[in-house]
Amino acid sequence: MRVVVPKEIKDGEKRVALVPDVINKLTRLGLDVVIESGAGTHAQATDADFKAAGATISDSEVLSTADAVLSVAPLTPAQMAKLKKGAVTISFLSPVTAVDSIDAAAAAGVTAFSLELVPRISRAQSMDALTSQALCAGYRAVLVGAEMSPRFFPMLMTAAGTVTPAQVLVLGAGVAGLQAIATARRLGAVVSAYDVRPASADEVRSMGATFIELELESLEGAGGYAREMTEDRAAKQRELLTPYIAKSHIVITTAAVPGRQAPRLMTQAMVDSMGPGTVIVDLAAETGGNVEGSKPGEIVTTSGGVKIWGGKDVPSQLPFHASFLYSRNVVNLLTLFTKAAKEGEAVAFDLNFEDEIINGAAVTHGGSRRGAK
Amino acid sequence: MRVVVPKEIKDGEKRVALVPDVINKLTRLGLDVVIESGAGTHAQATDADFKAAGATISDSEVLSTADAVLSVAPLTPAQMAKLKKGAVTISFLSPVTAVDSIDAAAAAGVTAFSLELVPRISRAQSMDALTSQALCAGYRAVLVGAEMSPRFFPMLMTAAGTVTPAQVLVLGAGVAGLQAIATARRLGAVVSAYDVRPASADEVRSMGATFIELELESLEGAGGYAREMTEDRAAKQRELLTPYIAKSHIVITTAAVPGRQAPRLMTQAMVDSMGPGTVIVDLAAETGGNVEGSKPGEIVTTSGGVKIWGGKDVPSQLPFHASFLYSRNVVNLLTLFTKAAKEGEAVAFDLNFEDEIINGAAVTHGGSRRGAK
Amino acid sequence: MSRTLYDLVGLAAGVAFILALKGLSHPKTARRGNLIGAFGATLATLVVFFYANPGSSLPLNNLGWILGAMVVGLLVGVPAARKVQMTQMPQLVALFNGVGGGAAALVAIVEYLHLGAEATTAEVVFTVFTVIVGCVSFSGSIITFLKLQELMTTRPVIFPAGRFIIAATLVSVIGVGGWVVSSLGTTPLLVLAGLSLLFGVLFVLPVGGADVPIVISLLNAFTGLTVAASGYVLDSVLLIIAGTLVGASGTILTRKMAEAMGRSLFGTLFGAFTAKPQDTSGSAEERPVRSGSPDDVAILLNYARRVVIVPGFGLAVAQAQHTVRELADMLIAKGIDVAYGIHPVAGRMPGHMNVLLAEANVPYEQLAEMDEVNPTFGQTDVAIVIGANDVVNPAAQTSPGCPIYGMPILEVNQAANIIFLKRSMRPGFAGIENELLYDPKTMLLFGDAKASLTKVVSALKAL
Amino acid sequence: MSRTLYDLVGLAAGVAFILALKGLSHPKTARRGNLIGAFGATLATLVVFFYANPGSSLPLNNLGWILGAMVVGLLVGVPAARKVQMTQMPQLVALFNGVGGGAAALVAIVEYLHLGAEATTAEVVFTVFTVIVGCVSFSGSIITFLKLQELMTTRPVIFPAGRFIIAATLVSVIGVGGWVVSSLGTTPLLVLAGLSLLFGVLFVLPVGGADVPIVISLLNAFTGLTVAASGYVLDSVLLIIAGTLVGASGTILTRKMAEAMGRSLFGTLFGAFTAKPQDTSGSAEERPVRSGSPDDVAILLNYARRVVIVPGFGLAVAQAQHTVRELADMLIAKGIDVAYGIHPVAGRMPGHMNVLLAEANVPYEQLAEMDEVNPTFGQTDVAIVIGANDVVNPAAQTSPGCPIYGMPILEVNQAANIIFLKRSMRPGFAGIENELLYDPKTMLLFGDAKASLTKVVSALKAL
Amino acid sequence: MEPMAIVSIFVLAVFVGFEVVSKVSSTLHTPLMSGANAIHGVILVGAIIVADHSSTNLELGLAVAAIVLATINMVGGFVVTDRMLEMFKGNKK
Amino acid sequence: MEPMAIVSIFVLAVFVGFEVVSKVSSTLHTPLMSGANAIHGVILVGAIIVADHSSTNLELGLAVAAIVLATINMVGGFVVTDRMLEMFKGNKK
Ligand SMILES: NC(=O)c1ccc[n+]([C@@H]2O[C@H](COP(=O)([O-])OP(=O)(O)OC[C@H]3O[C@@H](n4cnc5c(N)ncnc54)[C@H](OP(=O)(O)O)[C@@H]3O)[C@@H](O)[C@H]2O)c1
Ligand SMILES: NC(=O)c1ccc[n+]([C@@H]2O[C@H](COP(=O)([O-])OP(=O)(O)OC[C@H]3O[C@@H](n4cnc5c(N)ncnc54)[C@H](OP(=O)(O)O)[C@@H]3O)[C@@H](O)[C@H]2O)c1
Ligand SMILES: NC(=O)c1ccc[n+]([C@@H]2O[C@H](COP(=O)([O-])OP(=O)(O)OC[C@H]3O[C@@H](n4cnc5c(N)ncnc54)[C@H](O)[C@@H]3O)[C@@H](O)[C@H]2O)c1
Ligand SMILES: NC(=O)c1ccc[n+]([C@@H]2O[C@H](COP(=O)([O-])OP(=O)(O)OC[C@H]3O[C@@H](n4cnc5c(N)ncnc54)[C@H](O)[C@@H]3O)[C@@H](O)[C@H]2O)c1
């Protein structure tokens, strides 16, 4: 069986779906791993590294012979069309935004797994690419914020006066938000955070930051995710958050609700309430933005001197470790349904749809889109 | 008496020599403070802020009426020529590189103070702008390094595998180097450092980093600075450092010897010994570079995939706090020779060349260059 | 041998007992303390063969009987003590205590018979005291033995009107005691002994299994007092001192044990009088857990060779990272092999534990990944689980269908001892019970992790 | 009043003394302990007026004299104790101890005279012991008093052949003691008393000022033993118990004091025998510093209302940031006002202390800049300087020309107490001596800052 | 011995008993109890004394029984305590 | 009282004395010494007893002197100890 990793073609995507040091986990099972030449360049993995790890490098068309295709971004409809019937793909594949690719997969008779849909159960944590990539994003958010800020993060008492610590506010304390809190605290900033989930207060405090209690009802959805806010509540939340925002030097927003637009946490007025030289990092820019006026992949400077950094492919900005974590997620999912080669028997895929994870993550199978997803 | 702060005209200089919140220290003495309009823009100080703090904003030519001129970069010879005879200037003014400005100051009969020449005695610590700006540079160096690195700095054990911490090597553990150590350690990196001064080992360890003992004789010059290396020793040091460099993910170099070219710590071969995706931050790029191939203000990527960031105006990249600290240094030096206004008497400058600091820092006075500097 | 020399040797033995108790109250010297005690006892026993009583000639009368009886005692006692299993030691101690009490009662009876009408009132009063308390100690200890050995139910035995029967027995014991003092005679004394034995049984029956050790300790103190009383009757300073020491230290110890186990001493002891018959079939039995004190934890750690620290979300909530590092540093300084076993999803964020422990400056080398640390639990003396739960829950391996089934865990259940620091019996993130909390190898230290760790660190310093 | 009741009250007083000593060894109960002791002493004194000796009638003979003498004693003792300054208390204690020893010697002499030839050998031996030790205690204490009060030189007084004279005196004391026992008579006893007084003087003269407190403690234990011996002669259980208690606890205390001061007990006490005359004019006198123990530091901190922690480069070298935070947290938990006074150039890098303390998670609000904290030192009970030196060196304000002159400093010299944690008397970065180390308000705790702090934290927990 | 002496000895012994065990840590509770239990086995001395001056068979029989019991208490007690304390051997340093 | 009783009492009292002060912290050394010093002032009881049965003027004189000294020791000792302990009043909580 051939596992193929094509070069990512999406602009700005610097990750690779397999890094050399996990390849042996697949070859050990009896799988052949084929990497498109140059696939790992941005993630500091050369063709030679892959070869040394036991993979084959291919310069030519790779998809048509693949039994399984591993990628980060969804395969394009064109790529999907090239696949054998019955082939398997594993990648990010949002049922909301990647509709074309999903349709193409269904049409091609491909079984396409979406990492967004891996259920958040304990057993699946090692396949949870949303979490691993959010980790990278949260870390990056702080580095970017610190880089753009004209201020120090830590407090420093020096002969030339005392530098006061930066006030960092994190909105949305999920995986990315918590990591942002941790990183900002490491740098010495005074960090506070807000989130709508009830468990969040304890989690924020467990990172050593201050949780902002707004006395609004909490919003918890399925699988530990948040629910969408009503417009009423959103307005109330914005109003109550304004004073905290006004006194922050850096605001990092990470709020998301699965399958929806990112909630709008900050209006233009709230942005304007911040002083010159302050920075906003909007990790949700790609899905609509938590902050009014943020543009994915751009730094917008408001007339008031506030810089808004809109995140785009943020984990790609940490390509080495983002790929490192991503490829382990992918390998864990792949091995879940791979029957290792035994005496006389060849390696095979065994898609057991009774399994909660396989059932949850497979978007297409046998020529059609699965379930009501 | 008029204290004037012109707008910095040097390209890339974002600091300002006075920030609003120190102005009252001068006005309290009876000095008039005049700020050229827009001087504080990059350091988040608006004209309005200055006005509110008690300064006058001037749009027109400001230098000709000044009794004292405070700036960050040296005044250009043209600017010097505009000054009144007997006026005082305080700025960075390297006796090695700013020869033209010094000559112009002497010609104009100006008393020019060089912050580089403030002696390193305890009493002068509050005027030591080299230290305060090095602090900013050291902090920035790590942020920049972390930003450019494709890796995480901290160790993280996750469901998708364990991210090992970045190995950071700091060469030259002076003020900037120590701050870089502190910042990298805060971010969770494993930090080691090397310096030639004998006291350095203890200082490095007191920051929680590992000191690299090379068993070479130590080099200590006057005033707590290092001495220049002989070419022999330099070669030996490079040889011994190579293995440490080869296993580092980030190298930050800060080595300097006052009044000299920056010592060459890393050759091209040493750079090449590092893997793809590694980063070198050369804070000494402007004075010749610690690293072969570094270019001030540029990021050079070697064929081996090593990125070399050459520092240029590094403290300017943290304009708010760099100006904050710098202006306190300048004010402390200015007040050292200002006789406050008393009953009936006007404020006056009282240049007592018996004072070690004034004697040390004044480069020109009474129409000529002072001493053998 | 002169009386003075004899007495001085006795005093020396008494001093040995003091040193023995002193030694026994500190881990480092406990063993030596016990040996000193044994030495004192041997000395005291030997010297009595050289001097018995004013006027009586040596060698002792009935020497053959005496030596024979001692040999029998040795043949019974030593093998029993040698062969007993670790877990059965408490009941053996109970048994030994009982026979000691019995011996004291017998000695008092013999002396009473011997003195006959010559006895002073004081002597009779002390004899009565010894007989009562010795018999209570004897029969009470036998019952505790039976309970601990599970030869009878470990639950409180409560029968209708029990408390009235007990009270009545106590009153009769006292009455018969008075009768003995006033009338002097063998019969009343035997009646007294019988009633006292009965009272001992009744006194211990209503005590529940968990409280039995406290009762043993109390009976032990009682026995000490009977020995002191015998010392008065027999004019032996040694017996007075030894008995009083045991009585006094035993009392303190009983109180401390009750405190450590969170029991009310009064409730435990007078339960017999207040207990009402209960519907025993009713509510589901509360499952027993073993909870320890910071001292217990400190001692376990102190004598371990390898300790694995397993941090979890609770460590983060308690912000106990600095304290845990302090603990680890202390253990390392003692030459103990210490590692932190980090589960990939401990906490609530990937790398949560790393962030915390890095803040406390824990060297990266001490952090071990799950795959690295799991094979070492077999050689680990103590696994100390600090505010973690799901990540060590064996249900992940044993209970298909539970929410964490299939998640790899840190196999702390392979370690020789497991210590849990948590605040309650509440489950963790996944909301499922952790069987490990009820494991006999597990000791629970309840409380906020930081507060608990601080106490453990203090206790460790005090060792 | 019956003898038994009298004796029981005496025993009760003895118990009070036990409780008194127990109380006195713990800060929280010390005051109450002393009151219990006073209560016991009062009780014992009162009861003697109701019962004196078998057969003697009440009221006591010579009652007027007795009461009069007591009044005189009160009139002398109370005002002296009330008015004495804090710094002069040690010499007053020495004096009190001396008069106590004198009293015991007098009591023994009177009883000896009274018994005359009736005295048993044992009684005479005890009398001789009491007289010798009481007199030594008396004259020795007087000398210690004179030394501490600086009425004579505080340096060791050593004269040629001194040790032979002392040895000879001791031999004569013992000889005359033997003579008293064998011959019985007033003259030998008076000779004995005289020689003993002389020996006391000779014994204490060679002791140097710093060792005097140890000697006082020893003489105190001696006096206790004389009281116990008097108890034997006077057949008083109370005096036996009280005297023995003081003797035993005094001995332990003497050893502990010597340990705490880093002195060899043997060297201190037998210096008299081994000391050789020295060239006192020679080497420059070593300047005295006051060094304390972690316990002392803990107690100072525990009873402070405001504490300022001044960290410096040494804190960084020792990497003691976590420990210092632990200490601060404990003090804050006790309701003490704690601030960190951060000097702008403490350490070797701008913000060095911030980096360290942030790592230990010290809240930013607890960090006070120099300008903010300097005005508060006047209201600060304890400034604890941890591995800092130059930044608190008053030379910066007082010694024009020294390298740090003109640098603003943290004015810890304004605080009521200053504690320095450093490893030696070595200077800091600037290489200049710090007068503050010799300040009488300063206590030095030598050792690595982290190790020292750990000990202080333990001591604080034990309080 | 005089009652007063006995009372004094008793009172002092009580204090000693209290003090010496006042700092015991809870893990030593059981060994300490066991050790104290062994110590009261010294009633063996009393049993030997009464065996010595037993005049009737009844007395002697009871005394012999007392000796057996006391020996078990004493010897068994020390042995079992020692076994309990094996874990404190201190296999380190 | 029998010598044996006295020796026993002495030995036990020594243990009590050792034990009760064994944990004293160094800052309490001086107050503890001072308190112990006051306790031995109870020799006053002895002085009163000998004054009671003094038969000669010499004896009485010496006894009276002893009473004066012992009273100073006892009363002064407790008072000065109390003053030393003022700092432990516990002005907090
Ligand atoms: N790491 C991740 O990325 C991530 C993300 C989301 C969810 N999770 C899930 O979180 C769980 C992590 O497991 P875990 O073992 O670390 O945590 P856990 O299973 O949630 O257990 C934490 C335990 O700590 C105790 N605790 C809480 N506060 C405490 C305090 N102040 N002092 C002492 N104990 C305290 C609680 O018991 P008491 O209440 O009795 O004190 C609780 O049993 C896993 O189920 C994992 O799947 C992980
Ligand atoms: N902050 C800056 O930017 C900067 C830069 C360069 C120079 N300086 C200079 O550095 C000095 C800073 O003053 P400072 O008071 O912080 O330091 P300091 O004057 O150098 O004193 C440090 C003290 O710490 C003690 N010490 C060292 N290691 C120790 C350990 N492990 N445990 C306990 N004590 C230890 C040393 O005494 P022992 O050896 O007896 O233990 C020493 O006296 C100033 O003179 C300042 O001008 C500052
Ligand atoms: N059990 C598991 O396997 C597992 C794994 C990873 C995460 N989780 C849990 O899931 C939670 C969410 O994870 P995520 O980071 O992927 O979520 P996410 O990326 O979907 O959302 C990020 C955060 O935004 C918050 N948010 C949504 N709307 C908001 C609003 N209007 N205002 C403020 N905040 C808002 C959410 O509550 C969430 O914390 C985590 O915190 C974690 O506890 C569980
Ligand atoms: N007393 C004071 O007032 C005061 C104030 C600030 C700094 N200082 C001292 O001065 C020292 C140097 O200060 P700086 O940072 O301004 O120095 P710098 O900027 O001149 O040099 C930076 C560092 O490079 C090092 N270096 C020089 N040649 C090297 C080589 N070949 N290899 C490796 N390292 C080399 C130097 O030793 C120095 O530590 C500081 O570390 C500090 O201890 C003293």
Image: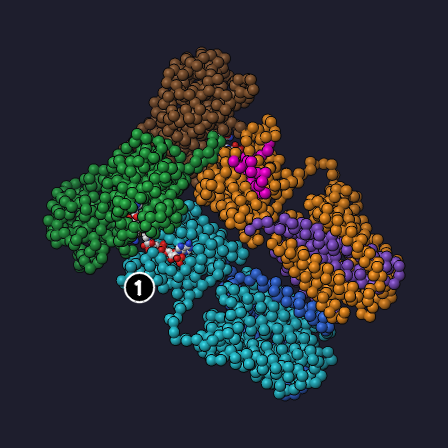
Chain colours: A brown, B green, C orange, D cyan, E purple, F blue
Q: Is residue A118 visible?
A: no
Instruction: Provide the chain ID for the residue under circle 1.
Output: D
The x, y position of residue B262, in whole percent, is: 25, 43
Determine whether B121 is above or below A293 in the image. below
- Residue B117 is situated, as x and y percent measured from the top left of the image, at 22, 51
Q: Provide the residue span drawn in magenta.
A: C372-395
Query: Which one is in front, B291 or B358?
Result: B291
D219 or B71, nearer to the observer: D219
Q: Residue at x 35, y 57 (%)?
A: D428
Which quarter of the picture shows residue B360? bottom left
Q: Crowdedness of circle 1 by 10 Å Cα count: few (<14), some, many (20+)?
A: few
Q: Quadrant of residue B268?
A: top left
Which of B216/D105 is in front?
B216
Q: Which quarter of the picture shows residue A79?
A: top left
Q: What residue is at 59 percent from the left and 28 percent from the top? A: C402
Q: Which residue is mark 1?
A: D398
Residue at 84% from the left image edge and 58% from the top image edge: C65
Question: Looking at the picture, how far across and down is residue B116, in whole percent?
Answer: 23, 49
Front residue of this view, candidates B54 and B10: B10
Q: How many marks?
A: 1
Q: Is residue C74 visible?
A: yes
Does the magenta-highlighted stretch encompass residue C301? no
Residue ID at (81%, 56%): C69
Q: Does residue D439 sit above or below D276 in this rendering?
A: above
B58 w.r.t. F53: above or below: above
Look at the picture and state if D263 lies above or below A189: below
Q: Amino acid at mark 1?
A: Thr
Disc 1 Cβ-to-ligand 2 distance below 8 Å: no
The residue tagged with tag 1: helix, strand or loop?
Answer: helix
Question: Percent position (x, y) of residue D172?
Answer: 58, 82
